[in-house]
Amino acid sequence: MPLDLTPSQALGLWHAVAVEQVREDGRDLTLRQLAILLEIYLVPPPHTVRGLAARLGVTKPVITRALDTMGEQGLVTRVRDERNRRNVVIKRTVEGALYLEHLGDVIIAKARAQNS
């Protein structure tokens, strides 16, 4: 389904999705947290705090704070790398996968509604 959107229509779609998320989901992820979560789920693993910080151009403490919040919400987990105990590997969770699958469904539904 190719979409040809103007910038205003694209922002309208983003707005509709954001409003739906606020209404439906109590997690209230920041844009930074969502970007980190998408990086973890859409880019093949492994993912480390250091790697995520470099990829997103932020500091390791920024990633750590975001992961703390997302971990409390069950969207990701962290485990020590058995090969290098200094590294922490970020793992996907079923709850995180379901969250993003639902978000994808919301985006599709809002895009279709906008094109109707």
Image (cartoon, rainbow, N blue to C red):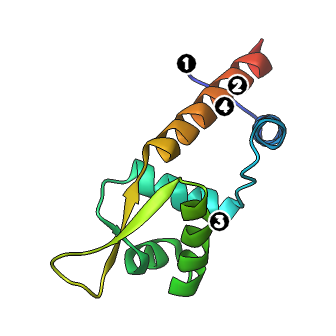
Contact between marks 4 and 1 (CB within 8 A): the answer is no
**Which residue was labeled with disc 1?**
1
Name the residue located 77 percent from the left edge and 35 percent from the top edge.
13
Which SS class for mark 4?
helix
- Residue with the mark numbered 4: 107
Residue 64 placement (x, y as % from top left):
54, 78
**Residue annotated with mark 2:** 111
Q: Where is residue 12 in the image (x, y as percent from the top left)?
A: 83, 37
The residue sitting at 75% across, 54% down in the picture is 28
The one nearer the camera, 95 or 36, is: 95
Q: Earlier in the sequence, mark 2 or mark 3?
A: 3
Mark 3, residue position:
32
First in residue order: circle 1 vs circle 3: 1
Contact between labelled residues 2 and 1, with CB atoms less than 8 Å apart = yes
Q: Distance between the Cα atoms at labels 3 and 4?
A: 18 Å
Q: Distance between the residues labelled 2 and 3?
A: 23 Å
